[in-house]
Image (tube, helix red, strand yellow):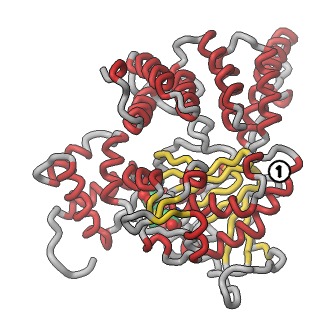
Amino acid sequence: MPIGLPLALPDPLLSRLSDFLEAQMGLHFPKERWRDLDRGIAAASREAGYAEAEAYIRWLLTAPLTRTQIEGLASHLTVGETYFFREKRSLEILEQQILPELLRTRAQTEKHLRIWSAGCCTGEEPYSIAMLLDQLIPDLEKWNVTILATDINPQFLRKAAKGIYGAWSFRDTPGWIRERYFTKRQDGRFEIQPRIRRRVTFSYLNLAEDAYPSLVNSTNAMDVILCRNVLMYFAQERARKVVDNLHRSLVDGGWLITSPVETSTVLFSAFTAVEFPGAFLYRKMAAAGPRTTAVRYPVPWYGGEAGAPHAPAAPSESGAFSVAQSAFAPEVLHEASGEQATETGDADSREHDERDMRETPRRKARACADEGRLAEASEWCEQAIAADKLNPAHYYLLASIEQERGQGEAAERALGRALYLEPDFALAHFTLGNLCLSGGRQREARRHFGNALTLLRACPADVLLPEADGLSAGRLIEIIASVQASLPRAPKEFAA
Ligand SMILES: C[S@@+](CC[C@H](N)C(=O)[O-])C[C@H]1O[C@@H](n2cnc3c(N)ncnc32)[C@H](O)[C@@H]1O
């Protein structure tokens, strides 16, 4: 820790607080960063209305953090350094190697593409991707492209959603990008064009929580995940868990892009490290099994920055991300198939077969959805419904899949059926609300959110909701509250 004024808070309290923040938010404050922690927590406590930071910390330490507390803390404790087209080399590889290959294969099947900027900060990263896609795909309107951008800091997300930036955000951006995609405002700042802004969906997600991959927050079946300059703020164990979850969020063959400074053979050992001139990128190769040896791609041509491509930093075996052995065990999807049948007599095996007939299509639907094969997923789901017509969960799954395929009407129909069969299906009310919102029907959305809240408030907060991938009732209440808070003021009749 640098020599200077003494810290305002006692060391034991800072130590407890840093362990607690690590567990709840992934944020790692080793002793060398206690000055930042001391300063940040003082600001957060003032904002929360506490005269004494110590009292605020003791209050925080009494129970797991709520979403509101996490958001308040994140606003003061996260690092918001970012700019458009940062770390160009990886983006060039994305543009010139990865995306063209993906687009070629998808053009023949389903024209969909799913990209996630995890730890998107104020939006420069996902908007860079949106601009890049705009140049790369001439018939973009025929594609179902998702660019999901998530962060833990609500202030960053609000700024991102506005899409207004100062010159500093363009410090490494060619001038023509600003000309083409931004409008200069009277105050001298630059506003991103609405058509680019609309392509990115911003939402809150704490990477330290096990909330992904999930169909519920659309963090599944990603083709590309950018998680750059985020893992470096996490402790090793946390970074490993996050990488493990990101691995599961990718389709087979999907790519994880990190920052060059985060390169590590050990942390990303479940991936195949692919060496391009100037960068290492990580690819999920489930079929081939995890490999840590770097693979050399044919040397690509770079039209980007002038000068020879610089050599990538070799993945470090030591340093911030090195761990002795990866605890990661690649996940194998087990089908409920004949393998599990035992020779326990005819009745058992008949019963097993019947259950199998009912359950297998649903599992296949989920497996296909997880891998991004959405048309196939939808077909399996229809089969699940045909075998078990009165099961609302099947309709909910179908709705999630159709939503991901960009088939809003089909998704709404399926949700309608789920709710007909199970009117108390809170998650279905919530999802329907979201669909209405994205269709601009705010009044209807409010009604569905209201229904969901009424149902959720009637259950204990820690009850896990059916079909929600581990989401609890309390958590969904918080999520709905924050969606409602972001809506424009309700007309009088709803402003109760
Ligand atoms: C330095 S910025 C990186 C932004 C961008 N990815 C880039 O490389 O330019 C780090 C971001 O990670 C976010 N972050 C930190 N902890 C997080 C967590 N637990 N979950 C989600 N985002 C987190 C911060 O709020 C911040 O926006």
Nearer to us in this view, 363 or 149: 149
- Does mark 1 have its CB less than 8 Å from ligand 1? no
* Residue identifier under label 1: 106
Helix, strand, or loop for circle 1?
A: helix
Residue at x 83% of width, y 50% of height: 106
Outermost residue to the left: 51
403 up-or-down from 427: above or below: below
Residue at x 51% of width, y 21% of height: 426
Can you give x and y, in whole percent of width and height, for residue 26 in the image? 43, 55
28 up-or-down from 342: above or below: below
- Asked whether residue 235 is in view, the answer is no
Residue at x 83% of width, y 9% of height: 347
* Image side of residue 393 versus residue 197, left or right: right
Can you give x and y, in whole percent of width and height, for residue 392 in the image? 65, 16
Can you give x and y, in whole percent of width and height, for residue 223 in the image? 71, 53
Nearer to us in this view, 427 or 447: 447
Q: Amino acid at mark 1?
A: Arg
Query: The C terminus appears in which quarter of the rendering?
Result: top left
Crowd around label 1: few <14 · some 14–19 · many ≥20 (10 Å): some
Q: In the picture, residue 105 is in which quadrant?
A: bottom right
* Image side of residue 410 versus residue 205, left or right: right
193 up-or-down from 332: above or below: below
Can you give x and y, in whole percent of width and height, for residue 135 in the image? 71, 63
Disc tally is 1
Query: The N terminus appears in which quarter of the rendering?
Result: bottom left
- Asked whether residue 442 is in view, the answer is yes
* Image side of residue 421 versus residue 340, left or right: left
Outermost residue to the front: 186
